[in-house]
Amino acid sequence: MMTSLSSAVSGLDAFQQQMDIIGNNIANINTTGFKSGTGNLVDSFSDTLQAATVSTAGSSTDSMQIGTGVATGSVTNNWMTGTINPMNNNNDLAINGNGFFMVEDPNNSNTPYVTQDGTFGLTSKGNLQNAAGMNVMSTTGTAIVIPQTNAAGAGMTAWTVTGSGAITVSYSDGTTASAGSVAVENFADPGVLVSAGGNLYTNMANAGPSGAVVPGTAGTGTIVQGSLELSNVDLSAQMAALITAQRGFEANSKIVTTSDEILQDSVQMKR
């Protein structure tokens, strides 16, 4: 009876966590580059009432165990690429396939991050940065700078990025110049990455990093300029999962109530 109560409480905790995960997924349905999470449940330790035995005659008895509940074993992300959506901003970039952009705080080069949010912009000095003011890194490990004027003083009129990340700048005098290449990084186990908020991830060293590579190599996707990768949250699937989690929570609540009623009856039997 007490086991049923503790098992039901563990179920309430687990299904509450499931709803927390689903709620976060739905809240980020419009977050650029967001990857949905899934809570994976595992059973808890079981009480063994009788161990399995094998007699000398060869007959056997099965073990008798009663489970003690459930727990959230892990939370995994779905790293499938979201829809690549064309935007009206030439500064926006998307990775069509695996990989992350490499960004770095200009005030702290010892704190690098990776992101799949390619919402970028140019500063007055030509630095390509994300919304938090972090520099987008090149394949040479330096911050990308797109010169706003050339040696002749002509102003920049446009800049383009190829699928392999190569940047070409056009100037008003008809000349063009190279401005390096956008780097991407891939990971053997992206599930080890730790979300730092702001669509940024850390803990790259433990995720099996490829290092800065040319887009389209080392298993990475290619760059699409003027586009953004949308969230890969499937709203229909999330709503179905939410209903399942809600019903699981309700069922465990009923077990708690029933166990409480039995305990109350047991106490009253003494009177």
Image: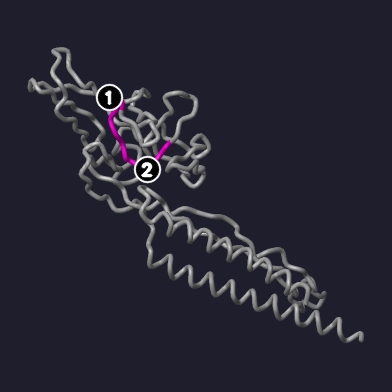
**Between marks 1 and 2, how big is the CA–CA gap?**
24 Å
* Residue carrying label 1: 124
Q: Position of residue 143 (x, y in %)?
A: 35, 24
Q: Nearer the viewer, residue 85 or 164?
A: 85
Residue located at (80% from left, 73% from top):
49
Q: Nearer the viewer, residue 81 or 113?
A: 113
Q: Position of residue 11 (x, y in %)?
A: 64, 68
Q: Position of residue 66 (x, y in %)?
A: 73, 73
Q: Is residue 15 left or right of residue 127?
A: right
The image shows residue 70, relative to residue 90, as above or below, that is below
First-in-chain label (1 vs 2): 2
Please, what secondary structure does the residue beneath circle 2 have? loop
* Residue carrying label 2: 116
Residue located at (48% from left, 44% from top):
189
Magenta region: which residues?
114-127
Q: Position of residue 213 (x, y in %)?
A: 35, 32
Residue located at (28% from left, 22% from top):
125
**Placement of the C terminus among the 4 image quadrants:** bottom right
Picture quadrant of residue 177:
top left
Q: Amino acid at mark 1?
A: Ser
Residue located at (38% from left, 39% from top):
100
Tell me the colour scheme of the image.
Answer: one colour
Q: Is residue 118 left or right of residue 76?
A: left
Task: Find out whether residue 55 is within the magenta segment.
Answer: no
The image shows residue 157, relative to residue 228, as above or below, that is above
The residue carrying pointer 1 sits among few (fewer than 14), some (14 to 19) or many (20 or more) residues within 10 Å by Cα, namely few
Q: Amino acid at mark 2?
A: Gln
Q: How many marks?
A: 2
- Residue 208 in view of the camera: yes
Looking at the image, which residue sits at the far right?
271
The residue carrying pointer 2 sits among few (fewer than 14), some (14 to 19) or many (20 or more) residues within 10 Å by Cα, namely many
